Amino acid sequence: MAHDERRLEVLRAIVQDYVSTNDPVGSKALADRHDLGVSPATIRNDMAVLEEQGYITQPHTSAGRVPTDKGYRLFVDRLSAVKPLSVAERRAIERFLDGAVDLHDVLGRTVRLLAQLTRQVAVVQYPTLSRSAVRHLEVVQVAAARLMLVLITDTGRVEQRVVDCPVDIDAGAVAELRALLNSAFTGVKLTEAGDKVPDLLETAPQHLRGLVATVSSILLETLVEPGEDRLVIGGTANLARGSALDFQGTVSPLLEALEEQVVVLRLISEVEAGTVLVRIGEENAHEALTGASLVTVGYGAQDRALGGLGIVGPTRMDYPTNMAAVRAVARYVGQLLAES
Amino acid sequence: MAHDERRLEVLRAIVQDYVSTNDPVGSKALADRHDLGVSPATIRNDMAVLEEQGYITQPHTSAGRVPTDKGYRLFVDRLSAVKPLSVAERRAIERFLDGAVDLHDVLGRTVRLLAQLTRQVAVVQYPTLSRSAVRHLEVVQVAAARLMLVLITDTGRVEQRVVDCPVDIDAGAVAELRALLNSAFTGVKLTEAGDKVPDLLETAPQHLRGLVATVSSILLETLVEPGEDRLVIGGTANLARGSALDFQGTVSPLLEALEEQVVVLRLISEVEAGTVLVRIGEENAHEALTGASLVTVGYGAQDRALGGLGIVGPTRMDYPTNMAAVRAVARYVGQLLAES
DNA sequence: GCTGGCACTCCCACCGTGCGAGTGCCAGCA
DNA sequence: TGCTGGCACTCGCACGGTGGGAGTGCCAGC
């Protein structure tokens, strides 16, 4: 029916106006600013229906309407097209990310870029260890009975662990150990590293067995485990900035949740490369994220996501633009990392 | 003169009361809450003098007095003793930091601990590269003409750089290069690494010269340079929390400055191990830090500071307690890192 | 040099009010 | 049947006036 379409048009107009002005929007303002072809009175009727359906609400009688989470959801799913970035923005992305010297630097730049582009809090996950493979394992002797294990993955991550050994180790053993570990693990996915351990133990010369066992267990325990994933966060100033109003006065619970990392990590790792995922307000089970929206996407090669990135902001945000920015940045980062 | 002493006592009382209540403190309240042995009228006279000397000020007529930056300075320098930590707090420090698996983890825990202990924003610098020595240099082939250089320092830092080479490299060359670099640089301080390059180039076999030159220059350019220092920041939620009032409404400039890192890094690296440094309000040249105080200290072995750590908060903070916390944490972190 | 008393200042919280934006409903019209 | 203009009603909010209270400076007395 034509009615339904117009109602959706009204909802779209409400979302757009509310996002840009931050004021509850009334029927008259809508009629003025949009070519809906009907009078305010008609719009009022539509609004009443939309309200009954739960897409909009009014903060108090005789105020304008505000989209609900459900309203934003409908808007994102059916009423908006991802807005292409301007040439200037594309150029800014390139300029910002080019010249990065290492993974840490790439992700640091990415998070700043994303924060600047969207004026929201930006979040970037380090490439997941669980989807990475071993490129090289280095063993460095730190003290007589202490080794440092350095894992270099094919995604460019470098992780270190200190291993305490029961007995002193001589330099020759270190070299042997290094060779053994590399021949066993190089090229192996971290999730499958565990399967290689029995073989490794068998082929290891007698005098190294104990050492190899200790080292492998540390490797598996501390590196393969999920929860070892890292997050870079930036643009928190954007939270304190305008959107104090959007979070009923205080942003500190949200900041705490962000610093805690674990909640956001769980959400951000449920991504696919290329598909932008939007979670709105109450859809985020966690309490501190009620009232906030996440826009996330996986980055990496086409076939597999190395990790996720995205933004966190008030539910009242410009979804089309932000989705575009997140997607574009992820694409560019994916390319950049594929090269190295 | 006895007068002067009592005046200082009055100043101390003002600072203490103001810090704990956040209300401008009047003569009557002072007389009630402190045993100054004189009447409010006398205190008023002292206050008038203190105000004339610039130690306190009143927000408006008929309000109580508030310490100025100068007043806090005097308080910190002469009127306060660093408050020893409670046993529970000491135990909390140990419990919090024990079980850290690597440098990243240690510093992450440190920053959370410090933020929790002081209820301020905590800042921890990675051990400065300029004061570190090379423990090991690893060279990993990433592509035909691309190497990854991994630097492991004696302070536990691991840094990586990607090096693009003009020509393809075979595996043998990589091994030779690794051996050359390690024999030249292992044990050498990063600041002195430059001096070793001429020797290195001379002893390098003909066919590796070009490669060695490329790699060394990357090493020196990107790793020895200052500005490569890193910062971990935590507890920003504490900023948004109560102290919104302390920063004339908005904390976002301060958050921006923190994320920028460079300003704070400059301040935090001017530390000595063991000596707690306090910078109050206007003393911080940078605009965004006006209105904020920094309490910093170097951590590391007794003889040399590996890096700095500290807190950032409103000028209205509990200096004695925070100074104690910062010092205790630095000491503990120093010990922890000395072991590894 | 300290003290109590006193007059004065001035912020702030409180309150009542009018305005305006916005709504819902209704009768009329295409 | 659905859209429209009109109208009465609601209610939040900005606004201005006001009283109380906390705090001060000064002064005379001890």
Image (cartoon, coloured by chain):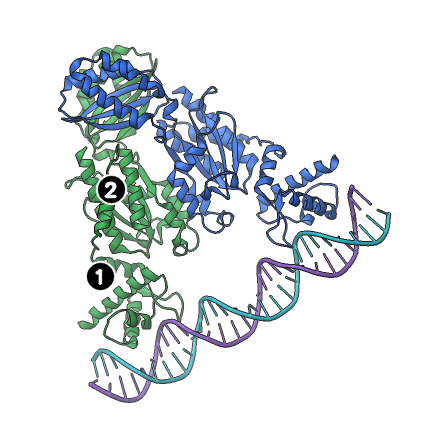
Chain colours: A green, B blue, C purple, D cyan
Most foreground residue, A120 or B339: A120
In the image: residue B45, left or right of residue B147: right
Find residue D22 and report its horizontal and vertical position in percent: 65, 54
Name which of mark 1 and mark 2 comes first in the sequence: 1
Badge 2: few (under 14), some or many (20 or more) residues near its Cα, within 10 Å? Answer: few
Q: Are marks 1 and 2 in contact (CB under 8 Å)?
A: no
Say what secondary structure mark 1 lies in.
Answer: helix
In the image: residue D26, left or right of residue A208: right
Amino acid under label 2? Arg
- What residue is rendered at 32% in x and 17% in y? B195
- What residue is rendered at 58% in x and 37% in y? B73
Q: Which residue is mark 1?
A: A79
Find residue B336 and report its horizontal and vertical position in percent: 42, 23
Measured along the vertical axis of the image, is residue B335 above or below residue B294? above
Say what secondary structure mark 2 lies in.
Answer: helix
Q: Which residue is mark 2?
A: A95
Most foreground residue, B225 or A134: B225
- What residue is rendered at 67% in x and 48% in y? B29
Report if residue A165 is visible in the image: no
Find residue B280 and report its horizontal and vertical position in percent: 53, 38
Find residue A93 and report its horizontal and vertical position in percent: 24, 44
In the image: residue B70, left or right of residue D5: right
Measured along the vertical axis of the image, is residue A137 above or below residue A23? above
Q: Which of the 4 image quarters holds residue A299?
A: top left
